[in-house]
Image: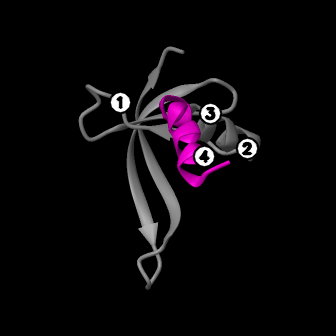
């Protein structure tokens, strides 16, 4: 298969890339964060259990500016 054909095939499913990230986060036992329209500076946080929150996110980096930790502050709990 040509390289451009592979890229075209991958790009046809680009709209579900967030769902793949969500699924992988849950497989690893991690929460999934998403920026949604109307949330302003906040993010949606979804836990593998289905609980959802609106959170303020702070990304902690090391001395090389590489992300090493995500800290979040719950603003409010959302209905699933």
Q: Alpha carbon of mark 3 to alpha carbon of mark 2: how far?
A: 8 Å
Q: Is residue 6 visible?
A: yes
Q: Alpha carbon of mark 2 to alpha carbon of mark 1: how far?
A: 22 Å
Q: Alpha carbon of mark 1 to alpha carbon of mark 4: how far?
A: 30 Å
> Outermost residue toward the top?
79
Q: Alpha carbon of mark 1 to alpha carbon of mark 3: how far?
A: 16 Å
Q: Earlier in the sequence, mark 1 or mark 4?
A: 4
In this picture, which residue range is highlighted in magenta? 1-18
Q: Does 45 lie within the magenta span?
A: no
How many residues crowd mark 2 within 10 Å: few (<14), some (14–19), many (20+)? few
Point out the image quarter for the C terminus. Answer: top right
Find residue 20 and report its image quarter. top right
Q: Is residue 32 visible?
A: no
Residue visible at 42% across and 60% down in the picture: 59
Secondary structure that dominates the magenta span: helix
Q: In the image, is 40 to the left or to the right of 3? A: left
The residue singled out by tag 2 in the image is 29
Q: Position of residue 73 (x, y in %)?
A: 42, 45
The residue singled out by tag 1 in the image is 36
* Observer-nearest of 79 and 18: 18
Q: Are marks 3 and 4 in contact (CB under 8 Å)?
A: no
The secondary structure type at the circle numbered 1 is loop
The residue singled out by tag 4 in the image is 6
* Observer-nearest of 51 and 10: 10
The secondary structure type at the circle numbered 2 is loop
The residue singled out by tag 3 in the image is 47
How many residues crowd mark 4 within 10 Å: few (<14), some (14–19), many (20+)? few
Find residue 65 and report its image quarter. bottom left
Q: Alpha carbon of mark 3 to alpha carbon of mark 4: how far?
A: 33 Å
């Amino acid at each position: 298969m040509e390289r451009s054909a592979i890229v075209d095939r991958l790009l046809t499913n680009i709209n579900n890339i967030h769902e793949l990230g969500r699924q992988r986060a849950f497989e690893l036992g991690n929460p999934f964060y998403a920026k949604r329209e109307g949330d302003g500076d906040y993010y949606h946080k979804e836990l593998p259990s289905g609980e959802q929150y609106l959170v303020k996110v702070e990304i902690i980096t090391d001395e090389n500016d590489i992300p090493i930790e995500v800290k979040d502050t719950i603003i409010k709990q959302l209905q699933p």
